Amino acid sequence: MQTESLKKRRRNITIAILCVITGLLFALPLLGLSVYFMHTLIGVFIWIIVANSLRLLGLSGQGSIGHAAFMAIGAYTSAILAKFLGWSPWITMPIGVLVTVIVGFLVAVPFTRVRGIYFTMVSLFFGIGVLAINQVFNKWTGGYSGIISIPRLFAYVKNPYYYFCLALMVVCLLIMYRLEHSRIGLTWKAVAQSYSVASSIGINEAWQRILCLGVSCTFAAIAGVAYAHYYVILTQETFSFNTSINVFVYMTVGGAGLFAGPIAGTAVLLIIPEMLRDLREYVPFVYAAILLIVLFLMPQGLAGLPAQLWQLIRRPAKAKLTTSDDKAGKRAP
Amino acid sequence: MNMILTSTVNGLVLSAIYILVALGFGLQLSIMGIFNFAHGAVYMIGAYVTYGLSVALGLNQWVSLLISVILVGASGLFLEKFCFRPFQNKPTHMIVMAIALIMILETIVEVTLGGVTRALPAFVPGIFKAGSISVDNERVLAFAIGAVLLAAMTFLIQKTKIGQQMLAVAQDAEGAALQGIDTHRIAATATVIACATAALSGSLMATIFSMNPFMGDNILLKAIQVVILSGIGSIGGILVGGLIMGFLNAFLPVFINASVGEVITILIVLGILLVRPKGLFGYELF
């Protein structure tokens, strides 16, 4: 009974903190945010959507290192329609997302044949394959040099973009959170834990994995179209293998086990190198240092840090005990 | 006709390099079960160490190649112990570790030498002529070294005790440990071999093409393609996979279009993965 009320209180506190953070983010432009930092934050919002959609895909046990390909399909579709047919971005953006969803569901069908590390490799080659196809149609996509001067959503001011991307991120995150904690999310987790057990209790494993990929690539495409009409330039490098890997790193460094993980990872890994940009070519060292610190000192990722610290402060003796237990557990196979 | 012959020779040379790089990647994958995405960076470092010793310090080029192979190979011991072993059972963390390694290595080279494209002088300058075809000696050398090393690796794995131990660990690490095989020692050996072959092939490639801090990225993808084509855990299959990939990459850009050739290659790899996830010659690893 007591734990129940404690849980409720903790939940209320979390909701309150989240509301304050969101309110602050919405109020920041009014408080005199520099245009440069606003630009950085818009990028952070877009990549948070992608990183969280990657985590959503991971819920059903499908780790992908080709997720930027879905962004690319959405972004290029929308950009080409808007630029060469002259349609309004407000129409082409939903079309881009729709095309990506169709492609996502179509490729998900053969992808259900492979699981685990084999799925990861298939996703890798899917990502490279999309880029190679992009090269073949270089008449429209521009090949290596890419598309430039894609029509903008708003005129040359940052504020509307800031609010648009922030609102988009909040809505996407809310939907993804509800999805994860709904029956569908639980089903996906069951599939990830053991597909044979999941099938034996009447879960259609293949369909659930197709659904998960379809939903996940929807969010990636939403981020992709937002990217295309904000940065107004798409090149071969924008959605390359490196991008997919970077998104994967954001998710893992933040902590793939927690919903807040990809958010924390993206924010830290995008903002800190940006703040230290005076170091110029030494910035990758800072980035690598963050990765190494998280890898060796924070097993739960950045988002798990508060819990880790709390345990250390509150019950040092007990914390020590659990760590030694962990070690003992690790030694036994 | 001439074009076909030239492409065949090019295909053989490309295959030799792909096989050398893929062999290291495949060894680490089958023995430790890790995806070492940093393998391309090690390949790049090998080329740069050879460059630094021979061009900057003025050592004999063959000696500097030897020193580079030994140095980079020895660094494999460090990599295995501190970078790979802690993350052996955490594939996601291993990917992040590899990214951190790539960033550190590429940035070190970029900061010290700059991101410009450089060329390593040829080991044996000149052109090799046989009938109607002519190839530069460098490519012949790359093929010869590749073939010799491949034969040596096959001998090592098939005939020696440590090779048999490697196969045992690749098949079942726990079972191998129960038989008294020191799995960590085997993993360290595999990493040293992988790093040494990567350094060697990087130096050879740097003489044929050019070198820059990011030269490892492309070859890494090719190595992964070869390993997947041939199958995880199959070391003999890498020979066949490397030949297929080498010839596809030598013929398709010449006879069709380079970008269409790329799509065809990817489609072949994707198709094989989807129809036969374990690859042409592999067995199910996980």
Image (cartoon, coloured by chain):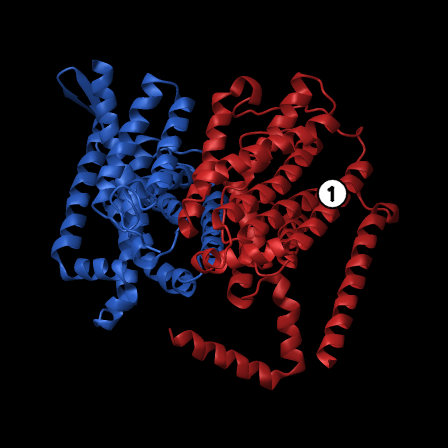
Q: Quadrant of the N terminus of chain B?
A: top left
In the rendered image, the vertical position of residue A295 relative to residue A95, given as above or below = below
In the rendered image, the vertical position of residue A151 relative to residue A54, given as above or below = above
In the rendered image, the vertical position of residue A293 relative to residue A232, given as above or below = below
Q: In which quarter of the image is the C terminus of chain B?
A: bottom left
Q: Which of A205 and B20 is in front in this view?
A: A205
Q: How many marks?
A: 1
Residue at figure coordinates x 32%, y 48% from the top left: B25
Rendering coords of residue B41 (x, y %):
40, 46
Q: Chain A is drawn in which colour?
A: red
Three-letter amino acid code of the residue under disc 1: Leu
Rendering coords of residue B230 (x, y %):
28, 42
Residue at figure coordinates x 68%, y 22% from the top left: A82
Q: Nearer the viewer, residue B132 or A332?
A: A332
- Horizontally, residue A212 falls left or right of residue A162, namely left
Residue at the outermost bottom position: A317
Q: Which chain carries label 1?
A: A
Rendering coords of residue A325 (x, y %):
49, 80
Chain letter, blue: B
Q: Which of B207 and B237 is in front in this view?
A: B237
| One can see residue A290 in this view | yes
In the rendered image, the vertical position of residue B176 relative to residue B215, given as above or below = below
Secondary-structure class at tag 1 = helix
Residue at figure coordinates x 53%, y 30% from the top left: A236
Disc 1 marks which residue? A168
- Horizontally, residue B148 falls left or right of residue B71, namely left
